Amino acid sequence: MYPKNPATTNEIPLDQKINLETARINWHELQTHFARGVCIYVAPELDLVNIAHMIATDNSAAIALLIQEGKIGKVSDIMAQQYYDCNQPMWAVVVMPYVLVQPDNTIYC
């Protein structure tokens, strides 16, 4: 059996799908997700789509290293308060069950 060719099917490669589902959103709109404990911070110097792809494909070794380095992790209460105070613009993408959030590095409060 031959692998499916994305050019001849309706399937979109995962990295392109993630890219299409990434959006800019202000922090106030993410409050519900933060309250549920599913907001994951991604450092601004990282590629959000790449991190989402790693999580979606369960690249646990790379993710563990980034967690250890403090470059990804749950949004802390202090971070959430800072983001809330100025309604920080974020980039966000859902990788069930998480919402990955990354401060928009062109706008800081």
Image: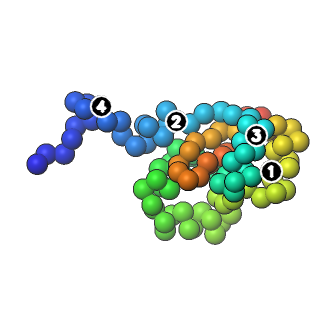
Q: Which residue is mark 1?
A: 80
Residue under circle 2? Answer: 21
20 left or right, relative to 106:
left
First along the sequence among labels 1 and 4 = 4
Residue identifier under label 4: 10
Q: Farthest residue toward the left?
A: 1
Mark nearer the N terminus (1 vs 3): 3
* 3D distance between C-alphas at marks 1 and 2: 23 Å
Res 54 seen here: yes
Q: Tag 2: Cα neighbours inside 10 Å, few (<14), some, or many (≥20)?
A: few
- Label 3 is placed on what type of residue? Trp
Q: Residue at x 43, y 37 (%)?
A: 16
Residue 1 lies left or right of residue 12; in this view the side is left
The picture quadrant where one finds residue 37 is bottom right
Q: Label 1, label 4: how many angstroms apart (C-alpha)?
A: 39 Å
Few, some or many C-alpha atoms within 10 Å of disc 1 (few <14, some 14-19, many ≥20)? some
**Viewer-side residue, 26 vs 37:** 37
Between discs 1 and 2, the one toward the N terminus? 2
Residue 83 spot, x, y in % from top left: 81, 44
Ranked by sequence position, the earlier of labels 2 and 4 is: 4
Report the amino acid beneath label 2: Glu
Q: Are marks 1 and 3 in contact (CB under 8 Å)?
A: yes
Determine whether the residue tagged by mark 1 lies in a helix, strand or loop: helix
Q: Amino acid at mark 4?
A: Asn
